Amino acid sequence: MPKMKTKSAVKKRFSLTASGKVKGAVAFKRHNLRKRPQKMKRKARGTFILFEGDAGIVKTFMPYR
């Protein structure tokens, strides 16, 4: 049986925590930040843990991680 391939996009954008949760970056932080409220920019710092439904989809794209 051939090996499954990991999606390159998922490999670059997400990582797994030690407990198996999927960690990713917050969206809408690339450009046009002058339009965004300061509160939104502050809350979007760092990373966040994906919800279980979304995490399941992402995990199917990275089978060996």
Image (cartoon, rainbow, N blue to C red):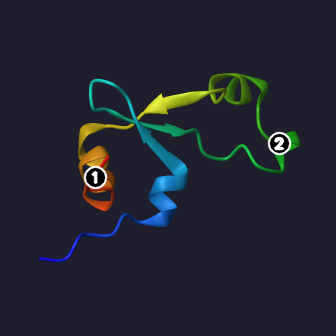
Q: Residue at the location (33% across, 53% down)? A: 58
Say the numbered circle drawn on residue 49: none
Q: Residue at x 76, y 49 (%)?
A: 30
User: Which residue is the site of mark 2?
Assistant: 33
Local crowd at mark 2 within 10 Å, few (<14), some, or many (≥20)?
few
Q: Residue furthest left?
A: 1
Q: Residue furthest right?
A: 34
Q: Is residue 11 toward the left or the right of residue 1 in the image?
A: right
Q: Is residue 63 above or below residue 49?
A: below
Q: Is residue 5 above or below residue 14?
A: below
The amino acid type of the residue labelled 2 equals Leu
Q: Position of residue 21 (x, y in %)?
A: 31, 32
Residue 64's disc is 1
The answer to which of 17 and 35 lies nearer the viewer is 17
Q: Are marks 2 and 1 in contact (CB under 8 Å)?
A: no
Q: Quadrant of the N terminus?
A: bottom left
Q: Position of residue 51 (x, y in %)?
A: 32, 37
What residue is at 72 percent from the left and 43 percent from the top?
A: 29
Of 31 and 59, the residue lying toward us:
59
Whole-angstrom CA distance, mark 2 to mark 1, is 36 Å
Which quadrant would residue 10 be assigned to in this image?
bottom left
x then y, percent, for residue 41:
73, 30
Q: Nearer the viewer, mark 2 or mark 1?
A: 1
**Secondary structure beneath label 2:** helix
In the figure, is residue 62 to the left or right of 37? left
Q: Residue at x 33, y 56 (%)?
A: 62
Which is more N-terminal, label 1 or label 2? 2
Could you classify mark 1 by the number of other residues whose Cα lies within 10 Å: few (under 14), some (14-19), or many (20 or more)? few
Q: SS for tag 1?
A: loop
Q: Looking at this view, is 20 or 55 the one in front?
A: 20
Kind of residue indicated by mark 1: Tyr
